[in-house]
Image (cartoon, grey):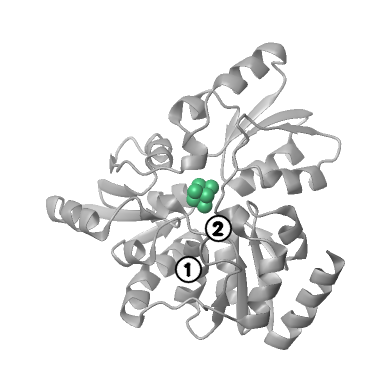
Amino acid sequence: MNDLISRLETLKSERDAVVLAHYYVDGSVQDAADYVGDSYYLSTIAKNSPHQTILFCGVKFMAESAKILSPEKTVVMPDTMADCPMAHMVSPEYVNNIRESYSDLTVVCYINSTTEIKAVSDVCVTSSNAKKIISATSTKNILFIPDRNLGSYLQGFFPEKNFILPKGCCPVHSDLTTEDLLSIKQNDPETLVLTHPECEPEIVGLSDFVGSTSEIIDFPAHSKANNYIIYTEHGVAHILKQKYPDKTFLFPSPIPVCKDMKLITLEKAVRSLETMASPIEVPESLRKAAQQALIRMHELAG
Ligand code: SF4
């Protein structure tokens, strides 16, 4: 492990590279990264990075977003097969059809979308900035894509708007059930339930706190509770244990694991900086169209 980390450090200076890692990748990769965060944080770091190379340890839409915002940089991934299935659950044709049906419409795409979807959207959001961005929209109709669960959660904050929601969802979060939550609450009502809004509404409704990955990670810092059950991807256990060694974090079963995020390993991270193989490429016309939605997100999110 130490050999891999020191090899990564050498390659970082040779390639003028910064290493970004999402909270859902393996802990060893998080430990080796320069920056660890959620989608919005990493997107901001990538946009402002002075380095010529970005090694993005996450799934494909994240690396593509970095390339869209910084076309002059080289963006590589440890494994380009790491892709978010939810990002492919709506098509540009679907978006264009809805546009034809509503004159007063904003197309809001979750950052977990393909470049093609970002290119036909008005603005991107992440789970940490979606409320702020939707509150800045002036239209009555909001097409929120692709996550129906996040969309339905957000809809609750905007009763004056009409949300149009497709059927997309995160297979990892939407598979979780209330079973563990109910039995843990019955045995220890003091245990707090912290939930990502990609989970089904039934779980969201029974939770003590609903927030983005970063907000879930920050929550115990301001809470007296010692025990938590975490309804999001298990990769966050790594930082939760580091930040709060005296608190207990349980996860529902089966343990929520994103197999795409887990394709990212330290060995592959080192290899990708060694070979610089398969850099992320986005055709220029598509990139320019997709860039608008990402730039608008950064402007509105501040
Ligand atoms: S956890 Fe869900 S939303 Fe996140 S990358 Fe995996 S499949 Fe996509």
Task: Report helix, strand or loop for mark 1.
Answer: helix
Q: Does residue 278 sit above or below 224 in this rendering?
A: below
In this rendered view, identify the residue nearer to me: 61 or 165.
61
Task: Report helix, strand or loop for mark 2.
Answer: helix
Instruction: Name the disc covering residue 39, or none.
Output: 2
Is the CB of the residue bearing disc 2 within 8 angstroms of ligand 1? Answer: no
CB within 8 Å, label 2 to label 1 = yes
Quadrant for residue 227, please give it.
top right
Residue visible at 73% across and 37% down in the picture:
220
Residue visible at 40% across and 58% down in the picture:
113
Q: Is residue 50 visible?
A: no
- Coordinates of residue 207 in the picture (x, y in percent): 57, 27
Residue visible at 74% across and 53% down in the picture:
27
Instruction: Name the disc covering residue 65, or none.
Output: 1
- Coordinates of residue 294 in the picture (x, y in percent): 43, 66
The amino acid at mark 2 is Ser
User: Residue at the top extreme?
Assistant: 186
